Amino acid sequence: MNIGILIPVRPLAEGKGRLSPVLSPGERQKLNRYFFTHTLDVISKAANPARCYVVSPSTELLRQAKERGMIPVKEPKNGDLNKALEQAADAARKAGIDALLSISCDLPNLRVDDISALLAAAKQGHMVIAPDKSRTGTNALLLSPAGAIRYHYGINSFSHHLAAAKKAGLTSLSLLRDGLAQDIDTPEDLAKWSYRDFL
């Protein structure tokens, strides 16, 4: 199966605004850079970079992705994430990708075996979904075929994706792994992670 990977990422200065009570703008930017680099490092070891699509309005981040052999997809500023992912999914399908994994870029515990577990679970007519720690959001979503359902990232995306898969006649698997569940959204999340080592 020819599997592609979508990696959406916001500009470094814009991401993680909910951490502003505890981090300065410079610290948030440094943290976002760490997340971006860590995600690309892990995925490059687990999959073919030539099948990875980095989706962002940031010219700088897209340039870095291209230098790694990944495919940059320009997202309009202030654009809709779900529409941007669908745009990238269309490009992937035209390039011969028949299954597509989208993954969040704020997973500090992400490891190669997490990506491998997602890819290994792929099969035709199937959705693999990794919820966040609260099991309300979606941190990774593998669709086979690519574009089988529309993306529903946002509030309660986990239940929305499950409902859409059921409506489309897809079987689904919820993959519960620490490396995929532990995202960093709030000061409380940050306090549980040794983030100072990365600032």
Image: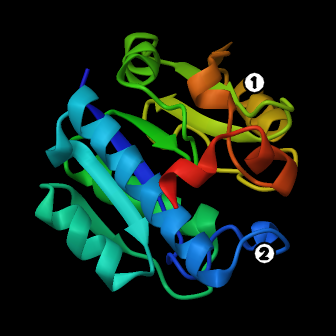
Please name the residue shown 28% across and 48% down the image. Answer: 52
Residue 99 placement: quadrant: top left
Horizontal relation, residue 171 to residue 85: left or right: right
- Amino acid type indicated by mark 2: Ser
- Amino acid type indicated by mark 1: Lys
On the image, numbered disc 1 is attached to which residue? 166
Q: Earlier in the sequence, mark 1 or mark 2?
A: 2
> Is 121 situated above or below 25?
above
On the image, numbered disc 2 is attached to which residue? 20
- List x then y, in percent, for residue 8: 49, 59
> Is 84 situated above or below 37?
below
Residue 21 placement: quadrant: bottom right
- List x then y, in percent, for residue 146: 43, 38
Furthest residue toward front: 197
Residue 126 placement: quadrant: top right
Give residue 117's mark. none
Query: In this figure, what is the number of numbered marks?
Result: 2
Q: Residues within 10 Å of mark 2 (few under 14, many from 20)?
A: few
- List x then y, in percent, for residue 179: 57, 26
Q: Nearer the viewer, residue 93 or 52?
A: 52
Viewer can see residue 47:
no
Task: Please state, as top left, top right, bottom left or bottom right, where the N terminus lies in the image.
Answer: top left
Element at label 1 = helix
Q: Nearer the viewer, residue 146 or 27?
A: 27
